[in-house]
Amino acid sequence: MIFTLPSPAIPVNNFYAAVVKSENSSGWVNCEVTIYKLVTPSEPKRRAHIVMTTPTGADTVAEALLSGKASCDVNFGTPIASYSRNYQMLQTFEPFRQGDKHFALISTDYVCTDVMDLQTGEIIASQEPPLDRGGKPQSSLGFCPIEFFVPDWWEQHDGSVKPGDTYWSDDKVMPNGTIGWVAGCVWGDDSSWKIQRLDLSLIQEGIITGDDRYGYISLPPQVALHQAITPIWENGTLHVNIAVSLWFDDFSGKVNPSGLQEITGGPKSTVKDGNE
């Protein structure tokens, strides 16, 4: 298998989303999002790539990003893309790559997930709101994203083992940006954040799909999605370690039955791209 290591000189966390929030007369929050590519990055921390700012431009963005840091040379340069989101931003910007191409998971609509090509700024794949029995889009059936996670190759490898080395295997090609996860809620059930899997293997053909194959599982409180999921590839098979939230009765030591039901098969709300 031919494989080229992703360049560590152009990490996925070179991309930042600067967000300006606005509120309409009914109190509904909207966001205007501008995406920047850092020109002179100084090893920004992984996933620190959403910056809340005001409509005064890149200087304000840089100031907000660097707040509290002793010294750092960052040049945001020219914006590469922008989009509107009809809800709060939350953590709905996740840069990732497939080979030498850079993309980002975003959410322009509060019940859908989109993929943006960060080279062109174009949205190349989108989930549509699920259809009701009459064939009409029904937002109340959708899954509302609040956080994304797509593991990067350099998060699981240090580059010390390269293609052709004794300990290299096909498993070490992964992750390659074709699988991701989203935390959020089925519309109306915001008591906890649930986890769904995203298939990103066909995004360059305009297709993104998601499902709740792990059950109706909840993300533990105050745990980020990328901290809760550990993907491991072994002998061509992906194994996923997921931290989930369970409640126990302290007197008996038994788990709350509703928690087990979530894991073994609770309410389903499979979300696909709307064209299937």
Image (cartoon, grey):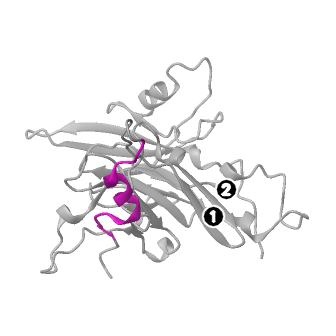
**Amino acid at circle 2:** Trp
For residue 150, side relative to residue 172 (left or right): left
Magenta stretch containing residue 114, yes or no?
no
For residue 240, side relative to residue 160 (left or right): left
- Residue 113: percent from the left, percent from the top? 36, 61
Q: In the rendered image, which residue does mark 1 sit on?
A: 176
- Residue 133: percent from the left, percent from the top? 15, 79
Q: In the rendered image, which residue does mark 2 sit on?
A: 153
* First along the sequence among labels 2 and 1: 2
Q: CA distance from mark 2 to mark 1?
A: 6 Å
Neighbourhood count class around disc 1 (C-alpha, 10 Å): few under 14, some 14–19, many 20 upward:
some
The boundaries of the magenta stretch are 253-271
**Amino acid at circle 1:** Asn
Name the one closer to the observer, 186 or 248: 248
For residue 98, side relative to residue 1 (left or right): left
**Which residue is drawn at the image coordinates 62% and 20% (left, top)?**
71
| Residue found at the very far right of the displayed protein | 166
**Which residue is drawn at the image coordinates 91% and 64% (left, top)?**
166
Magenta stretch containing residue 267, yes or no?
yes
**Which residue is drawn at the image coordinates 47% and 58% (left, top)?**
181
- Residue 105: percent from the left, percent from the top? 44, 57
